[in-house]
Amino acid sequence: MVSYDEALKTILDNVAPVGSEQLPLGDAIGMVLAEPVTAPWDLPLWDNSAMDGYAVRAADCRGPSCKLRVTGYLPAGTAAEGIGVAAGCCVKIMTGAPLPQGADAVIPFEESEETSGEQVALHGTVTVGQHIRRQGEDIRAGATVLQPGTILRPAELSLLASCGMPMVTVQRRPVAAILSTGDELVEPGTPPGPAQLINSNGISLAAAVREAGSVPRMLGIARDNRPSLLTKLRGGLAADCLVTSAGVSAGDRDLVRVVLEELGVKFLFWKVAIKPGKPTAFGIFEGKPVFCLPGNPVASQITFEAFVRPALLKMQGHTALLRPTQRAVLREPLHGGSRMQVVRIVLEREGGQYYARSAGSQETGILRTSLKANAVAMIPPNRLCKAGDTIAVRLLYEPLAEV
Ligand code: AMP
Ligand code: MG
């Protein structure tokens, strides 16, 4: 039996990004950039006005109230060719329009007054360069603006669009095949008969795969016999990653590992010293990871979170693979067992301090506890954490502030 740390290290040492692909910018949110990006041109492309107002020569604007003649009009989208600002004159200009020849400042409408049509009276002081966005002041042509490994947020996608790129090369999302196994299972929608149980792991694992930025491929249910498992598992091994649930303990119908070995999967561990989640196995097939998770729904969710999620993130080129931790004061004692105990936790904030308590019964059969939990604590074997102790908990959800 391997420890939690050994299991995670073995997994991460054996997975790598699955490769890159080109995607339209609109499909690339949250993905990891695979190539450096160089700016093809200056940004801004040319000097332009940052305000609606008048393009002027600053030297003409002396005194508390001076008057200039309006000789032109430049809305955004109009080229400034042939439009200049002569001495004693100004050009009406809108935000984003190119700066006309001769102008070296913009006076916003709010600081000016248009009188008798062509004359504009200005008040206040005018400095050279005011309210002008200079060509290249943001980004210079030829500069490397994004490095590989960058996570694409709206800001990065905006920059790529401004660089004239309709497509971007990103690390591909891995396809994770999901197989539920068990003679007792029926799909959601089919009323369970006597001794039957609904395949809830299929849906929860698919959702977790999606939440981890990957693409689930549903293989449905394999029965606890060799021919059924062979057919389904063979199909699953074609994906970038295979995740099975159940049939991996010591029962006489637990054939998943045996059949996978027959198909050529090399197992690197079976059984991890955590609770819940002991009957977890990890193997490699043609360089691709194979995860066999326990059938119990709580255990399959916890082991997915602990082992599969970090692997899927690494396969997408992420380097930060674990959810953030938070130090919190325990409201009640937590007991470690003989294995590392994954305790589902309610984390609360009160007066700038975080507090942690158990989310309810930690029995593996109790799904209700998972509904309440927003964090987990990993309690080492045989450790007793007392009320008032400060422990680190791992956040399962990003806490958002209320309005
Ligand atoms: P096993 O590992 O096959 O012994 O399964 C452990 C427990 O998990 C049993 O009570 C199964 O009925 C249950 N179980 C197995 N697969 C699923 C599934 N896909 N959805 C919900 N429960 C399951
Ligand atoms: Mg079973």
Image: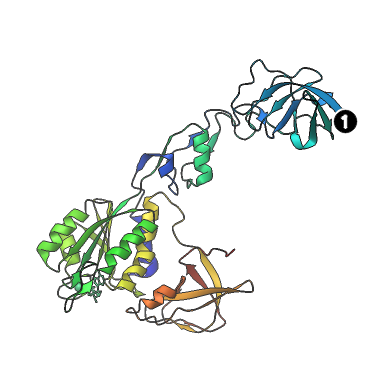
Q: Is residue 58 left or right of residue 143?
A: right
Whether residue 11 is visible here, answered yes or no, is no
Q: Is residue 161 left or right of residue 17?
A: right
Outermost residue toward the right?
Answer: 63
Residue drawn 18% across the image and 58% down it: 233
What is the three-letter code of the residue carrying label 1?
Answer: Ser
Q: Residue at x 49, y 31 (%)?
A: 164
Q: Residue at x 10, y 62 (%)?
A: 227
The answer to which of 293 and 218 lies nearer the viewer is 218
Q: Is residue 358 left or right of residue 218?
A: right
Identify the element where label 1 is drawn: strand
Specify the quarter for ligand 1: bottom left
All told, the count of numbered labels is: 1
Q: Determine whether 67 is above or below 221 in the image.
A: above
Residue matched to label 1: 65
- Residue 400 in picture, x, y percent from top left: 54, 63
Rendered location of residue 258, percent (x, y): 16, 65
- Residue at 89% from the left image edge and 29% from the top image edge: 63
Q: Is residue 72 above or below residue 210?
A: above
